[in-house]
Image: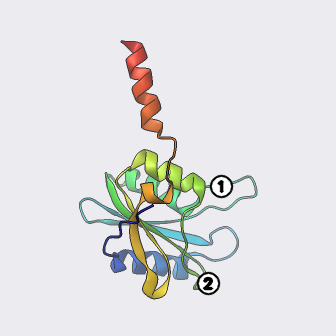
Amino acid sequence: MTTHTHPVDHELVAAAAEVARTRCHGDNHTMAAAARARDGRIVTAVNAYHFTGGPCAELVVIGAAAAQGAGELETIVAVGDRERGVVPPCGRCRQVLLDYFPGIRVVVGSGERLRAVPIAELLPETYVWADHQLDAEAADR
């Protein structure tokens, strides 16, 4: 697989790190996410851990962006509390990000090795929810 990297949005990483440092306290909120919308705005959020599951920070930031009218997200990053740095998205978040924003870039790596990669490269040969929707539309005709 060829990895296509893009410039890292360091302002976005710093925003997520600040939220992780200032808002993630205790076991309920251990991750922060920041996403940049097409209009340049940065939206932040934290996870809501619960033993029954609970949404990851990346999923919460998608909802927060929608609530704020931020529209299309271009780049996203998650940062762990306790100075853990950038944390890659879990499998569920990778699938949701691909389904909602197939062109989104995700910041991964650490230190000097931070890089922004297209979500499709983090979830190769995946099921694409939009393909199912196209099949359903064809059946309706």
Q: Residue furthest top?
A: 141
Report x, y in % for residue 79: 52, 75
Q: Report the residue at 74% width, 52% height from top.
A: 52
Q: Report the residue at 45% width, 45% height from top.
A: 99
Please say if 134 is above or below 71: above
Report x, y in % for residue 81: 59, 79
Please say if 126 is above or below 116: above
Q: Report the residue at 36% width, 55% height from top.
A: 68
Circle 1 crowding by C-alpha within 10 Å: few under 14, some 14–19, many from 20:
few
Report x, y in % for residue 101: 38, 50
Which circle marks residue 67 in the picture?
A: none
Which corner quadrant holds the C terminus? top left
Q: In whole angstroms, how far apart are the C-alphas of marks 1 and 2?
A: 20 Å
Q: Is residue 46 left or right of residue 63?
A: right
Q: Is residue 92 left or right of residue 124?
A: right
Q: Provide the residue designation for mark 2.
A: 82
Q: Provide the residue designation for mark 1.
A: 54
SS at circle 1: loop
Q: How is the image coloured?
A: rainbow
Could you tell me the amino acid type at mark 1? Gly
Q: Residue furthest left?
A: 39
Q: Report the residue at 62% width, 72% height from top.
A: 30
